């Protein structure tokens, strides 16, 4: 997935000779959306229409408040079908009325915001998540990603080369298309002054939240060193009409862009060795995450972080994009692949982007709302608390401040949001899709992996179940350490490894294997390393221990000399005889 722009066309030109005279190629093109396998949704409004047509959207016309009430309503709906979920007696939708996850909700009567609408829970079911990505099931995503990762230029005859056309077309569609401001709906209203974030129905989600938070933003930044663009999703606490917090966690890509801007600024202003200045700046500011005083420390001169004041990293935020673009902001992409390309690949159609008004960044042209601005390199501010997807509040911490320079939006913009809290909620289904997308990339690095599962109760980064094709002694531990070296998987607090004959999607089966197959002292290992910023139990912020459990069958080559018993199972012949009798048993 690291093709440069135009490389897909170059491969096509080299691989396919001109056909003989009179040759005709018939291509079937899907012109209409059918079932759960749509063409690309151009924007959020088209997606809303598709949801309503599919019976997956409920319009709410009763007046509700964006402060707490929308959260409480959505929380009840999103837990439909969840085991153990509780609601006030008689106050929750009936289980038979909706499938697990409930419907997407479009609130059309927001207290204090006449004429505004809020869309929430758009990804909150298995069917909607699949619809948003143009597949019939989330497992299809793994197949599409595998085909792309395994792409090789065709080397056979004309027929073999023609068979590659769909893959080459998918590569071509991945590249974004720049359009003019006149062609961009997000430019229908442009506010360069007298703008106010409070005009939008931004939610306060939970009672002890530090304020109102933008919860579904596509945050655009550019690496000042490489020029690579990134889209991430980081919550934004609204401080006032012109400033917000920017909660990019320490190990996220945008935070690295922020640190690179600090490094470059420090190197440009030092009178000493630039490399030493950059190392010192990172150490003294904990990677740009804490404020440090100017002047000497311990009697020795330090990097003057105050010189960074006035230096900026430009940022743009898109709210209310088409579903594939929104989802691309949370996909664990390879570092060299831009999210614009991921969105195009998932859509099967190039994403249209447009230049911002006041910053040198490009944003989705069909977004509902665009916020333009910057973060100042020397400025941090208290952010939080925030009721998070762990089911606990994230406590206050220091984060950069986003200053707005311009707001553009469509006429009558639709505000897209999500809420997080005790699982399962909307993000559970998004996490399931990420799991399926991440699997092919993991297999490329760790080929013995058969399947993975991130149980929703493990809130994505706390628990990973892994089945492997075990071929040598100690392989389960090798797999654990390999996973802890993979991007965002480094945050995984607990990894459980089982043999390939165990279905990791069946938590009961995994529990049986773990309870029976391990000797705790022998089969559990601990290690130290980076921990998710949301983990409130680690010994230090962002740093703590992790645990790996080897629940595979133990081999003599691993020092296990006792006999290993077979699992209890009926023989095949008896099963077949009972299968033949079953319809006559009246059961």
Image (cartoon, rainbow, N blue to C red):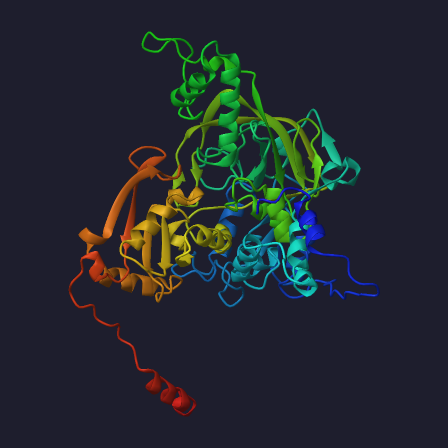
Residue at 51% in and 12% down: 269
Task: Give the image location of residue 338, x and y in percent.
Answer: 59, 41
Count of numbered badges drawn on the protein = 0
In the image, taking residue 586 as reference, residue 417 lies left or right, namely right
Q: Is residue 252 above or below residue 278?
A: below
In the image, taking residue 144 as reference, residue 275 lies left or right, namely left
Residue 581 shows up from this direction:
yes
Residue at 51% in and 37% down: 235
Q: Is residue 434 above or below residue 530?
A: below
Q: Quadrant of residue 570?
A: bottom left
Task: Give the image location of residue 539, x and y in percent.
Answer: 28, 35
The quadrant the C terminus occupies is bottom left
Q: Is residue 452 above or below residue 209?
A: below
Residue positioned most to the right? 22
Along the line of sight, which residue is nearer the eye, 195 or 153?
153
Q: In which quarter of the image is residue 154?
A: bottom right
Task: Give the image location of residue 302, x and y in percent.
Answer: 40, 12
Along the line of sight, which residue is nearer the eye, 311 or 193?
311
Task: Give the image location of residue 288, x and y in percent.
Answer: 45, 24
């Amino acid at each position: 997935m690291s093709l440069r722009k135009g490389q897909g066309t170059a491969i096509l030109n080299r691989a396919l000779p001109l056909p003989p005279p009179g040759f005709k190629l018939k291509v079937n093109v899907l012109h209409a959306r059918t079932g759960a396998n749509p063409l690309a949704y151009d924007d959020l409004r088209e997606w809303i229409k598709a949801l309503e047509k599919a019976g997956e959207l409920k319009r709410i016309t009763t007046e509700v408040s964006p402060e707490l009430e929308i959260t409480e309503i959505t929380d009840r709906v999103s837990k439909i079908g969840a085991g153990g979920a509780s609601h006030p007696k008689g106050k929750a939708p009936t289980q038979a009325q909706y499938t697990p996850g409930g419907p997407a909700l479009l609130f059309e009567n927001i207290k204090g915001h006449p004429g505004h609408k809020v869309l929430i829970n758009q990804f909150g079911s298995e069917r909607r998540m699949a619809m948003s990505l143009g597949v019939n099931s989330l497992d299809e995503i793994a197949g599409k990603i595998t085909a792309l990762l395994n792409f090789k230029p065709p080397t056979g005859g004309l027929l073999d080369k023609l068979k590659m056309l769909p893959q080459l077309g998918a590569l071509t569609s991945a590249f974004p298309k720049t359009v003019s401001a006149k062609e961009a709906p997000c430019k229908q209203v442009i506010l360069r002054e007298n703008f106010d974030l409070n005009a939008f129905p931004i939610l306060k989600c939970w009672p002890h939240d530090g304020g109102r938070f933008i919860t579904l933003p596509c945050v655009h930044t550019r690496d000042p060193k490489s020029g690579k663009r990134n889209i991430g999703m980081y919550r934004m606490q609204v401080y006032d009409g012109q400033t917000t917090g920017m909660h990019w966690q320490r190990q996220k890509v945008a935070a690295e862009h922020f640190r690179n801007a600090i490094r470059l600024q420090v190197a440009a202003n030092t009178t000493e060795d630039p490399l030493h200045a950059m190392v010192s700046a990172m150490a003294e500011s904990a990677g740009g995450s804490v404020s440090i005083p100017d002047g000497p420390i311990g009697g020795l001169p330090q990097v003057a972080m105050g010189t960074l004041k006035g230096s900026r990293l430009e940022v743009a935020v898109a709210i209310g994009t088409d579903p594939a673009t929104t989802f691309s902001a949370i996909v664990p992409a390879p570092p060299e692949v831009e999210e614009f390309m991921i969105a195009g690949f998932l859509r099967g159609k190039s994403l249209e982007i447009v230049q911002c008004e006041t910053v040198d960044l490009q944003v989705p042209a069909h977004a509902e709302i665009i916020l333009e601005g910057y973060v100042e390199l020397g400025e941090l501010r208290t952010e939080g608390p925030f009721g998070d997807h762990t089911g606990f509040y994230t406590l206050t911490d220091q984060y950069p401040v986003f200053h707005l320079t311009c707001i553009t939006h469509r006429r009558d913009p639709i505000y897209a949001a999500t809420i997080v809290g005790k699982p399962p909620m909307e993000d559970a289904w998004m996490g399931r899709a990420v799991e399926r997308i991440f699997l092919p990339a993991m297999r490329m690095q760790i080929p013995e992996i058969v399947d993975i599962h991130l149980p929703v109760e493990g809130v994505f980064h706390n628990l990973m179940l892994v089945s492997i094709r075990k071929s040598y002694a100690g392989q389960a531990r090798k797999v654990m350490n390999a996973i802890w070296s993979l991007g965002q998987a480094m945050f995984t607090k607990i990894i459980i490894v089982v043999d390939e004959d165990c279905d990791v999607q069946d938590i009961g089966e995994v529990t049986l294997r773990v309870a029976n197959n391990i000797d705790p002292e022998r089969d559990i290992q601990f290690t130290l390393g980076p921990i998710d910023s949301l983990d409130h139990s680690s010994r230090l912020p962002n740093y703590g221990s992790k645990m790996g459990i080897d629940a595979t069958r133990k081999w003599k080559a691993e020092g296990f000399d006792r006999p290993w018993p077979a699992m209890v199972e009926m023989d095949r012949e008896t099963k077949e005889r009972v299968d033949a009798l079953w319809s006559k048993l009246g059961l």
